[in-house]
Image: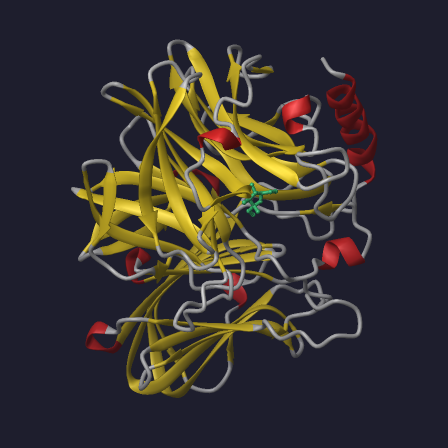
Amino acid sequence: MSERLNQAQKKLASWQPSVNARYKPRYHLSVPAGWLNDPNGFGFFQGKCHLFYQYHPYDTVWGPMHWGHWSSEDMISWKQEPVAMAPDCTFDERGCFSGTAIEDGGRYCIMYTGVCEETPGGKTFQQQCLAYCEDGVHVVKAKENPVVGHELLPNGANPYEFRDPKLEKTDSGYRLIVAVQMDGEGKLLSFSSGDLIKWTYDGVYADGFGEMSECPDCFELDGQRVLIVSVIGCGDESLVLPQPVVYVIGREENGIFHAHTAMRDIDRGLDFYAPQTCLAPDGRRLLIGWAHAWGCEMPTHRLGHGWTGTMTLIRECFVRNDSLYQLPAREIEQRRGKACIQGNLTIGGRTALAQCAGACREMILDVDMRAADSFAVRLMETGEECVVLTCDKRKGTLTIDRGASGHSFAKDGERDTRTCATADVSLPGDRLSLRIFVDVSIIEVYVNGGEKVLTCQAFPKGGAYGVSAAAEGEAVITRLESYELV
Ligand code: FRU
């Protein structure tokens, strides 16, 4: 083990016991101590699900990137594995950035971005590197690294903005789709190889992703080709965040992606970035994202709690009517504890839903809004403090508002500008169906069977985690299911 990996491991072991767990989610994965961003190397190897992540072990803000690691046999309980990679080689001395992995030939093969200095103290090259894991724990970097160096880049491609390889197996070997800034625009480049070591540049796979694209993912699903990209400098105001994660549905021809749809948000909430997908052994296309958005300051950092960074739930994806749908992976239902199931609750003025209160909950609400103009649910409620979810029937929208939810996400003294996010929702027969997950400091809302998802963090100062509902006019909750999640 290298000195830097050993040091990271020691830091984690000494820091983890003193982390303040007040806001730690219990059924979402969050960093044990330090800082976490993107999910990495998400997939299955030797029958276990592996999830690595961008990890800075020495602070609760972003810093030199390591890879943290969890594994699971059932996607319910997760084992914290030793730190998998540290920036300890000349080709990644400034960071082991995001990457992906596949099981192949009895090994877990990882491709990631190695960041290194062009000249001492100078700009940093981003190049693609290979690593192997044979025992599900220890990761060994290939001695041939970087295997996709900057010299393979075409004219116009920026070697300082070239990262996040998506590794796929093909009939003739392997393919990498890598994000790049090229001629000032976010594009994806395609490379192929027969042995993972010697790579050839094959051309632009897709383009038109703002000023820079990050973390591409692509796959076949329900007979369509789906491409997912995190976009910097997008400039499309119809998307929910300034740095959105979009999906495009299309087809692939001669190794080039052709879009059928415009870019659309995968998640319409305030906190979602850099998702990865993988194929489960049972054929499901699973997705996990970082439940955060660049540009916000995290309350747990400011409060000195010793940890910053949470993942979304693992989700199952499917394509319907040229749209990507997502539902929480069904394994979550095994965590259901005490349940309360009711029908026909009429909601006019504010009504407490005491049966839904609690810091770790799942609730399903089928709402008949025929006699209501709007329907609202307050989550994580203590007095006036809450996150509000409001469905406006006339506009056909669902808004999540964390403006009064407790600790601010703005830098000290600044105003929090990112407090609200809105999704268009279909309301067939004036009915709305919500599946809401609350987990201490994170909320995920799945609308109408996965048609839309809104993810949002909140750090309430109060500890009541109450829930209440209200309507303009009269709404009827035709079915309410509420589960404690354990
Ligand atoms: C996305 C990202 C990636 C990069 C990583 C660095 O959040 O910027 O493009 O590989 O984070 O931590």
In the drawing, does residue 287 fall left or right of residue 254?
right
In the drawing, does residue 339 fall left or right of residue 35?
left
- Residue 343 vertical placement versus 224 (above, below): below
Tell me the quarter of the image containing the C terminus.
Answer: top right
Q: Residue at coordinates 70% horizontally, 43% vertically from top-left?
A: 35
- Residue 484 vertical placement versus 346 (above, below): above
Across and down, in percent, residue 29 comes to: 58, 41
Number of callouts? 0
Across and down, in percent, residue 64 comes to: 71, 37
Can residue 314 be seen in the rendering of this structure?
A: no
- Residue 53 vertical placement versus 391 (above, below): above
In the drawing, does residue 139 fall left or right of residue 104?
right
Can residue 218 be seen in the rendering of this structure?
A: yes
Across and down, in percent, residue 437 comes to: 48, 55
**Residue 473 figure quarter:** bottom left
Please tell me which residue lies in front, 244 or 22. 244
Tell me the quarter of the image containing the N terminus.
Answer: top right
Across and down, in percent, residue 226 comes to: 28, 46
Location of ligand 1 given as a quarter of the image = top right
Q: Residue at coordinates 46% horizontally, 17% vertically from top-left?
A: 108
Q: Residue at coordinates 70% horizontally, 60% vertically from top-left?
A: 297
Please tell me which residue lies in front, 29 or 287. 287
Please tell me which residue lies in front, 176 or 103. 176
